[in-house]
Image: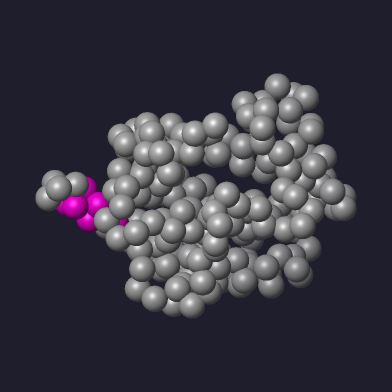
Amino acid sequence: MTDPFRDGDYRDEFDWEKEIRKDDDRVHDYLAELPRYIALPDEDKVISKRIRRRGSKWDDDFDAPADDGYDDDYDDDIPEEDFTRHRDGSDVYTAASKMAIDLTEYFAVEKDPAVARAMMRALTLLGKLMARSLDILRLEDGELVTFRIALTKRFLADLNDLIGEYEKFSDAEVRDFFLKDAFTMRDDALAKIREYRRQMKHK
């Protein structure tokens, strides 16, 4: 199976976006099932089997995460200290991880089931945002600009979904606290797309 990150098969931003949408479909299916099975010890495996039985678009070679933790095709992960540097993607990773930490504290004490479900979905979306930022962090400066554009466009779609979940929070102070950061991230993402397009013009 070819690796688009290594082989450069997807050079147009729209081709890249089509590929990224496959992951979006998987996450959408996963989020729909998560509230029902989250209390199970092997919820990832249960959910993936249920989605396959339902005839989802999940690839045949896609499986639940391995029990031994993070599984990646890359030989080395990014050193932790790189996240503090001024690298493309580091600001998104830092902002999303801070949001996730703050939200986890509220989720732990939330008593309204509807709000708790919204918080659960928001936490999963924040995980997606962090994963997308890692995809950019792994790139060398100036590498795969069309991929960066496509990824940031999907990042905006995730942010809009995240804002929708935040708007379900019943506590106005908590809701506004998270919405403020989400709107800032959205403005930054729009500015980043404009910057990428300027880079494309000068190539």
Q: Residue furthest left?
A: 202
Q: Quadrant of the N terminus?
A: top right
Question: Residue at position x 56%, y 57% from top?
Answer: 75
Q: Left or right of 24: which side holds 202?
A: left
**Which residue corresponds to the image point at 30% horizontal and 34% vertical from the top-left?**
12
Relative to 99, is 71 above or below?
above
Q: Viewed as shown, does residue 62 lie left or right of 74?
A: right
Q: Position of residue 194 (x, y in %)?
A: 23, 52
Question: Looking at the picture, how far across and down is residue 85, in whole percent?
Answer: 39, 76
| Magenta span includes 40 | no
Q: Is residue 113 visible?
A: yes
Q: Is residue 113 left or right of residue 171?
A: right
SS majority, magenta: helix
At x 31% / y 52%, what residue is drawn? 143
Task: Report the span colored magenta.
Answer: 192-199
* In this rendering, position of residue 78 left or right of residue 184: right
Instruction: Where is residue 196? Give x, y as percent.
Output: 25, 52
Looking at the image, which residue is at 63% across and 58% down?
123
Number of labelled discs?
0
**Residue 167 in view in this figure:** no
- List the single residue furthest toward the front: 75
Most extreme residue toward the top is 55
Image coords of residue 58 (percent x, y): 64, 30
Q: Nearer the viewer, residue 74 or 49?
A: 74
How is the structure coloured here? Answer: one colour
* Quarter occupied by residue 84: bottom left
- Tell me if residue 197 is in the magenta stretch: yes
* Nearer the observer, 178 or 22: 22
Q: Quadrant of residue 70?
A: bottom right
Where 185 sits versus 27, above or below? below
